[in-house]
Amino acid sequence: MKNVLDVMSMQQHVELNKAQTMKPIDYRKMNKPGVVPMYIFECAAKLKMKPLTAACAAIVFHRFFREVKASDYDEFLIAAGSLYLAGKIKEDESVKIRDVINVAYCTLNRGNDPVDLNDEYWSMRDAIVQAELLITRTLCFDLNIDLAHKYLLHYMKTLQDWVGTEVWNSVPIAKAAASYLQDFHHSANILKFKPTHVAIGCLSLALQTYGIQVPLTDESDESAMWYKPLVKDFTRENQWEIIENVIEVYKNEGFLNAT
């Protein structure tokens, strides 16, 4: 179980390393799918947010824009508001308003120094706080964010016992599944699926990535698939739809990094 839990703590370091090594993006000049979520995760890594807090911020952002017309709002301001609000929802003490302001500003304006405590700072602070209130009202004060991470941990523990420790430790299944799950939060399509289904889909992709066959299961028989005892309403169609959406995230990321 320790190996499974360690993966979630490692995810924070993975995100920080990705933010440090990725090609700097001028977000204001990019108008492509996935740009603002990438901005959210870069800011989250710089803020040293916990993976759950970063994922929560992305879900808040996606839920907000599901309810409104994107062109009516500054997406980057809503992103900053989502980061600040997620810190409160997840009680992440690393998320301070001044840090959110400076990280959001400097990430959006490459090469600029952090904002001094002047009129510009207080204007930005007020804007982010107002954005947080707008998001909360738009979501009808429903801030109960059910993330897939807890389900993934449970399913991984069950699967680890099922396939055996030797096979489980021979390839980084847990690390891959956690990465797929975190990266799926770049896409608003994650809202289309139940958190339990998202967790199974990402775990399934990890198993397929490393060619791991779960013992005593039959891939030709839907009822005998390994995930049926875990999530009865999950289907093969759900599986492939989620996998396709995760792969699409990586395609978009590759396009953005190449631009």
Image (cartoon, rainbow, N blue to C red):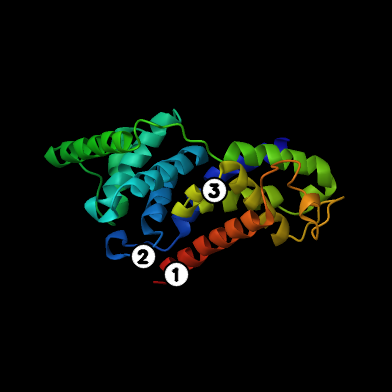
- What's the distance in space between the residues labelled 1 and 2, CA to CA? 9 Å
Badge 2 amino acid: Lys
Task: From the top left corner, tell me how far across and down residue 257 is, in percent.
Answer: 43, 67
Q: Residues within 10 Å of mark 2 (few under 14, many from 20)?
A: few
- Image point 49% across, 55% down: which residue? 18
Q: Quadrant of the C terminus?
A: bottom left
- Upstream in the sequence, badge 1 or badge 2? 2
For disc 1, the marked residue is 255
Q: In front here: 17 or 135? A: 135
Q: Disc 3 marks which residue?
A: 193
Q: CA distance from mark 3 to mark 2?
A: 23 Å
**Residue at screen point 41% across, 55% down:** 38
Horizontal and vertical percent position of residue 22: 45, 60
**Residue found at the very far bottom of the displayed protein:** 259
Looking at the image, residue 61 sits to the left or right of residue 149; the answer is left
Q: Is residue 56 above or below residue 22?
A: above
Residues packed near mark 1 inside 10 Å, few (<14), some (14 to 19) or many (20 plus): few
Q: Position of residue 31 (x, y in %)?
A: 32, 64
In the structure shown, which secondary structural element does the residue marked by tag 2 occupy? loop
Q: Is residue 253 above or below residue 193?
A: below
